[in-house]
Image (spheres, helix red, strand yellow):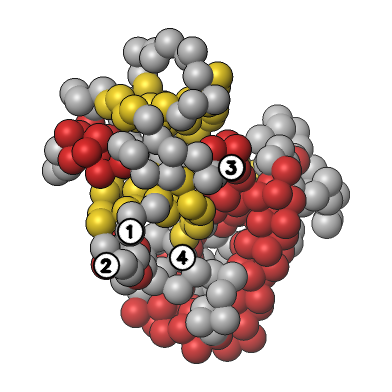
Amino acid sequence: MPELAEVLFATKAWEKGKGHKILKVETKNASRVFRELDPGLVKRTLKGSSLQGSETHGKKMLFRFSGEKWLGLHLGMTGWLFDEDSAYPTAKHDALVLRQADRTLVFRDPRQFGRVLSHKGKDAPEWWSNLPPEVHSDAFILELVRDILQRRKRALVKAVLLMQEFFPGIGNWMVDEILWRARIHPAERAGTLSPAKQKTLWEQTRFVTNGALETVGTRGGDPPKDWLFHVRWKDGGKCPRSGKALVRETVAGRTTCWCPFVQRLSKR
């Protein structure tokens, strides 16, 4: 599933459509991306408007159109955005197609775990404005992280970092990167982290997030070469810090990579 930096990069696929009118809207009405939403409403709302801008929050996207119209998108596991020429023939898994005079903007989702939301009004919809603080924002302070860890003190720290209500946009590879840099074992209980470790976790969460946004979010592709990311899936991969063999096992229901020499599990 795309994480926050990949989602930011994905929005750039529709940038060429900014300032241009939507002449026709096509929807795959049977797609589950329209669950609890009438696809016809999306057609009526967006037709005749022009794309004005976009923003992201975690794994979610928001597109602003003229006439106080808003489109929310979540890519899910297999969704992605792209643009084609105006003669583009709609394909089987194209859930939403916005046709302009010179191009076609497409949201495709084969497995249909994504989501489409619609809103009309002067201000951004509540389902957007009520989202938790982004991890790279000024509102994501150390005290907030300490509170989260205390509230979920019995949970594995790996699981806590994957909770989107607390760490929006953080996914599996980013969690492994954060914990490796913070020297915290993924199976550590959240409530066992010392104040110093809590601070390190907060710092590394912001470091990894900002680093991913500046690289992956800007140009796509991979994060910096010295990151754990580049060896975490390799059989026989070595820790960039210790040179020791990495371990890959299931932790908190997700395939997890860590260095047992750097990330030691505390005795309980």
Q: Is residue 14 visible?
A: no
Q: Decide if residue 211 is on the left or right side of residue 69.
A: right
Instruction: Answer with mark 2 or mark 3, whichever residue precedes in sequence.
Output: 3
Name which residue lies at 23% across and 31% down: 32
How crowded pointer 2 is (Cα within 10 Å; few <14, some 14-19, many 20+) is rated as few
Residue 133: image location, x then y, percent: 45, 73
Using the image, determine if residue 195 lies above or below residue 7.
Answer: below
The dot on residue 88 is: none
Q: Which residue is label 4 attached to?
A: 167
What element does badge 1 sit on? loop
Q: Which residue is label 3 attached to?
A: 15
Give me the C-alpha separation between circle 1 and circle 3.
19 Å
Circle nearer the viewer, 1 or 4: 1
Circle nearer the viewer, 3 or 4: 3
Instruction: Answer with mark 1 or mark 3, whichever residue precedes in sequence.
Output: 3
Name which residue lies at 62% across and 82% down: 199
Check disc 4 and give the amino acid type.
Phe
Give me the C-alpha separation between circle 3 and circle 4.
27 Å
Residue 34: image location, x then y, percent: 22, 36
Give me the C-alpha separation between circle 1 and circle 4.
29 Å
Q: Decide if residue 7 is on the left or right side of residue 177.
A: left
Q: Which residue is label 2 attached to?
A: 126
How crowded pointer 4 is (Cα within 10 Å; few <14, some 14-19, many 20+) is rated as many
Instruction: Answer with mark 1 or mark 2, whichever residue precedes in sequence.
Output: 1
Using the image, determine if residue 193 lies above or below residue 218.
Answer: below
